[in-house]
Image (cartoon, grey):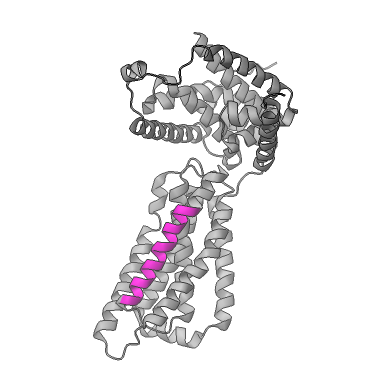
C-alpha cells in the first residue's frame, strides 16, 4: 500500500514537473512534406551536377541500354521511398513495417544492374570499368552520401525515433541510393560484375555506417 | 439551459484526449496534467499485456510520460491519441523487457552465495562512520547553489540520464554537465579532511 502510494506520488511529481511552465511546441510537418524537402535538396544537387556533366553521353547510354533506364529508375525510386520511410520511422508511433517500403524499388535496382552485368559479358566491345574507375565510383557514392546522410539525420533528429538504428539504416539507404543515382552523370561505362560489386559495397558501407554512428546520434537526441 | 453530458464512449474519450494534447501543444499546462494522469492506467495495462513484471510497471509509466513530453510535437491531433499512446507504451515496455533480459544474462541470482560470501573489508564500526559520512554529505549538498544541487539531485542521486534531467529542469545538457562538474568539485573541497 505504502509502495503503491510512493510510486503514485512519483508519477504525480513527474507530471507536475513536466506540466509546469509548459512551452508551446510547433507541430512537426507530415513525413511526406519533410521527405519532399530533403528530396528537393537532392534534386538541386542533381541540377548542379548536370551543369558540369556530359549530358549527351548520358542520354546515349540511357537510350542504348534499356536496363540502365531501369537501374536508374530503381535507384531513384529507392531514394524517394527510403527517404519517406525514414521520416515515417522517425515518428515514435511508427510501425517497423515502413522499413520494407523501399524494398521493391531496391529489388528493381539490383535486378536491372545485374542484367547490365550479363550484357557486359555477352556483348563484345562493352566498356567495362577498370579498377581505378571502380574506385572513383566508390569515392563518389560514399563522398556524396556523407553530406546527404548528415542532412537527413539532422532533419530526422527533429522527430523522436524510438527505433533509432532502423531509422538511421533506412536513412543511409536513401542517401546511398540518391548518391548512386547522381553517379550516373559521371559513369561513362556499362555495369560489370566488379562495378556492381563496388556499388553494392558502397551502398552497404553507407547503410552500416549510418546504423552504427547516426543511430547513436538519434539516440543521443532522445 | 442545456446540460453537457460527458461522452464516455471509447471514441469520446479519445476525442477528449486528442483535444487535451492539442491544448498541451499550445502550452496549456492544466490540460497536459489531466492528459498525463489519464495516460497512466492505459500505459499500465499495455505494460501488463506485454508481460512486464509488476514491480517494473511503474518504470515503464515514467519512461512513457517522459517520451510523451519529448515527442509531443510529433502528435497529429487529427489522429487517435489513444492509438499513438499505446504504440509508444508498447515500444517502451519492449525496451524495458530487453534491458531486463540483458541484465539477467550478465547477473546471476544467487541469494545463498551472496549471503555466505565473506566480506574481507567488513568493519563493525563502519555503520557508525557511514551514518556520520551521510550526514556530512547531506550538509555539504545543502550548502551548494540551487543549480548545482539540482544537477547532483537528478544526475547522481536519482540516476537520470542527461536527456531526462534536461527535459525535467528545462536546462541544456551542457549547463547540467557544467553544474555537476562544479558541484562535485565543491563537494570534494567540502569533504576534504580538515574542512
Q: Spot the residue most to the bottom.
A: A125
- A30 and B57: which one is in front? B57
Q: Split into 4 quadrants, where in the image is the C terminus of chain A?
A: top right
Q: Picture coordinates of residue A198 (x, y %)? A: 37, 72
Q: Can residue A85 be seen by looking at this rendering?
A: no
Q: Picture coordinates of residue B3 (x, y %)? A: 65, 16
Q: Which residues are magenta?
A: A194-213
Quarter of the image where one finds residue B17: top right
Whether residue A167 is situated above or below residue A65 in the rendered picture = above
- B74 and A203: which one is in front? A203
Residue at coordinates 39% horizontally, 25% vertically from top-left?
A: B52
Q: Spot the residue most to the left.
A: A122
**Membership of A90 in magenta stretch:** no
- The answer to whether B172 appears left or right of B160 in the picture is right
- B81 and B137: which one is in front? B137
Residue at coordinates 36% horizontally, 68% vertically from top-left?
A: A200
**Membership of A203 in magenta stretch:** yes
Q: Can residue A118 be seen by looking at this rendering?
A: yes
Amino acid at each position: 500500500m505504502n509502495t503503491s502510494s510512493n510510486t503514485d506520488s512519483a508519477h504525480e511529481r513527474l507530471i507536475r514537473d513536466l506540466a509546469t511552465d509548459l512551452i508551446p511546441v510547433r507541430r512537426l510537418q507530415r513525413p511526406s512534406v519533410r521527405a519532399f524537402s530533403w528530396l528537393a535538396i537532392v534534386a538541386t544537387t542533381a541540377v548542379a551536377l548536370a551543369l558540369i556533366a556530359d549530358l549527351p553521353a548520358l542520354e546515349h547510354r540511357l537510350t542504348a541500354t534499356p536496363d540502365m533506364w531501369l537501374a536508374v529508375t530503381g535507384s531513384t525510386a529507392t531514394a524517394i521511398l527510403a527517404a519517406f520511410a525514414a521520416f515515417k520511422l522517425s515518428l515514435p508511433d511508427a510501425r517497423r513495417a515502413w522499413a520494407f517500403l523501399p524494398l521493391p524499388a531496391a529489388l528493381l535496382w539490383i535486378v536491372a544492374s545485374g542484367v547490365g552485368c550479363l550484357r557486359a559479358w555477352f556483348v563484345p566491345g562493352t566498356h567495362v570499368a577498370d579498377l581505378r574507375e571502380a574506385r572513383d565510383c566508390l569515392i563518389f557514392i560514399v563522398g556524396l552520401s556523407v553530406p546527404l546522410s548528415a542532412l537527413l539525420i539532422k532533419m530526422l533528429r527533429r522527430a523522436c525515433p524510438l527505433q533509432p538504428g532502423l531509422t538511421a539504416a533506412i536513412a543511409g539507404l536513401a542517401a546511398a541510393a540518391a548518391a548512386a543515382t547522381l553517379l550516373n552523370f559521371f559513369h561513362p561505362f556499362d555495369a560489370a560484375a566488379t562495378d556492381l560489386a563496388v556499388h553494392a559495397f558502397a551502398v552497404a558501407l553507407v547503410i552500416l555506417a549510418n546504423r552504427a554512428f547516426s543511430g547513436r546520434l538519434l539516440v543521443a537526441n532522445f | 439551459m442545456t446540460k453537457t453530458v460527458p461522452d464516455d464512449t471509447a471514441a469520446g474519450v479519445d476525442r477528449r484526449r486528442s483535444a487535451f494534447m492539442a491544448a498541451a501543444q499550445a502550452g496549456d499546462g492544466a490540460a497536459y496534467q489531466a492528459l498525463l494522469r489519464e495516460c497512466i492506467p492505459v500505459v499500465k495495462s499495455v505494460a501488463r499485456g506485454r508481460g512486464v513484471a509488476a514491480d517494473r510497471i511503474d518504470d515503464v509509466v515514467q519512461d512513457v510520460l517522459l517520451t510523451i513530453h519529448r515527442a509531443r510535437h510529433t502528435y497529429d491531433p487529427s489522429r487517435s491519441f489513444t492509438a499513438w499512446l499505446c504504440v509508444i507504451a508498447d515500444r517502451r515496455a519492449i525496451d524495458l523487457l530487453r534491458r531486463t533480459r540483458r541484465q539477467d544474462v550478465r547477473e546471476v541470482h544467487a541469494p545463498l552465495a551472496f549471503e555466505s560470501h565473506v566480506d574481507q573489508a567488513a568493519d563493525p564500526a563502519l555503520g557508525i562512520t557511514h551514518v556520520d559520512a551521510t550526514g556530512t554529505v547531506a550538509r555539504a549538498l545543502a550548502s551548494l547553489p540551487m543549480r548545482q544541487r539540482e544537477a547532483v539531485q537528478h544526475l547522481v542521486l536519482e540516476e537520470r540520464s542527461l536527456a531526462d534531467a534536461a527535459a525535467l529542469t528545462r536546462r541544456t545538457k551542457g549547463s547540467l554537465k557544467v553544474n555537476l562538474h562544479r558541484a562535485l568539485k565543491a563537494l570534494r573541497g567540502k569533504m576534504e579532511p580538515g574542512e
